[in-house]
Image (cartoon, rainbow, N blue to C red):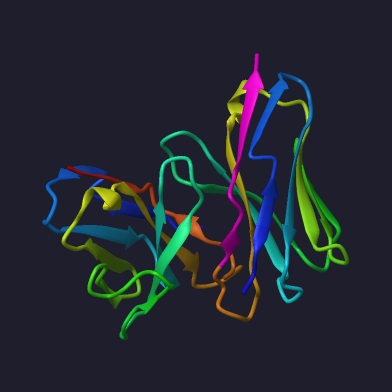
Amino acid sequence: SAVISQKPSRDICQRGTSLTIQCQVDSQVTMMFWYRQQPGQSLTLIATANQGSEATYESGFVIDKFPISRPNLTFSTLTVSNMSPEDSSIYLCSADPLSGARETQYFGPGTRLLVL
Amino acid sequence: GENVEQHPSTLSVQEGDSAVIKCTYSDSASNYFPWYKQELGKRPQLIIDIRSNVGEKKDQRIAVTLNKTAKHFSLHITETQPEDSAVYFCAATTSGGSYIPTFGRGTSLIVHP
């Protein structure tokens, strides 16, 4: 399995500002994903971070609001731009292994974001 | 696209009882079904998974069953313990496709000592 870390673990931000969340995997992975999880809710996929090309966004999420980078096979960032209180949530990155069961996703610990 | 329904949303049991969580899916192409456990404030962690070529899989106190014809799968936890208290998510994925799972809404399991 892959070991995934995220920074920061939590943050409190003012509306109108931006926050960049980092996701680091301890081994090369094929796919990395970014999810949002509202309190008491399920996991909502924001986008798939593609190495060497633009991210693929799910319906309801746009690049201007959630720009994503994936410079290599072990690292990705998600930026939450021009934040509003509605962006308060937990943001999780996940990855699937380069070998073995590619369908299995492993999650980072999450970033708890509160926007005031 | 795939749609995964999960029931119940909340399940309360006494320690030592069994717990069953059920999920249904809509896309017959889905062939991989993982279950994740998420403790409060923690990340979702894979606890068991099943592929469409088997009907049941067990790992100690947990088991998953799959009925491809009816498009439903279930998580069974026997001899529940307080540390089993968590939110459980089922998911359905298509191998060879996008590898992106569709998650259920989650079941909050509470095990009373």
Name the foreground residue: B99 vs A115. A115
Name the foreground residue: A91 vs A1. A91
Residue A77 in the image: above or below residue B75: below
Q: Is residue B102 visible?
A: yes
Which stretch is magenta?
Answer: B101-113
Q: Which image quadrant for residue B109?
A: top right
Q: Is residue B78 left or right of residue B98?
A: right
Q: Residue at x 50, y 67 (%)?
A: A97
Count of labels shown?
0
Residue B104 percent across, percent down from the top left = 61, 54
In the image, is residue A84 part of the stretch drawn in magenta?
Answer: no
Residue B30 percent across, percent down from the top left = 71, 71
Considering every residue shown, the one lying at the far bottom of the view is A53
Q: Residue at x 77, y 26 (%)?
A: B79
Q: Residue at x 76, y 20 (%)?
A: B16
Residue B12 in the image: above or below residue A80: above
Q: Which image quadrant for residue A18?
A: bottom left
Residue B33 percent across, percent down from the top left = 69, 60
Residue A11 percent across, percent down from the top left = 20, 43
The quadrant in which the C terminus of chain B is found is top right
Residue B76 in the image: above or below residue A99: above
Magenta stretch mostly in which secondary structure?
A: strand
Name the foreground residue: A4 vs B93. B93
Q: Is residue A43 left or right of residue B105?
A: left
The quadrant in which the N terminus of chain B is found is bottom right
Q: Is residue B60 visible?
A: no
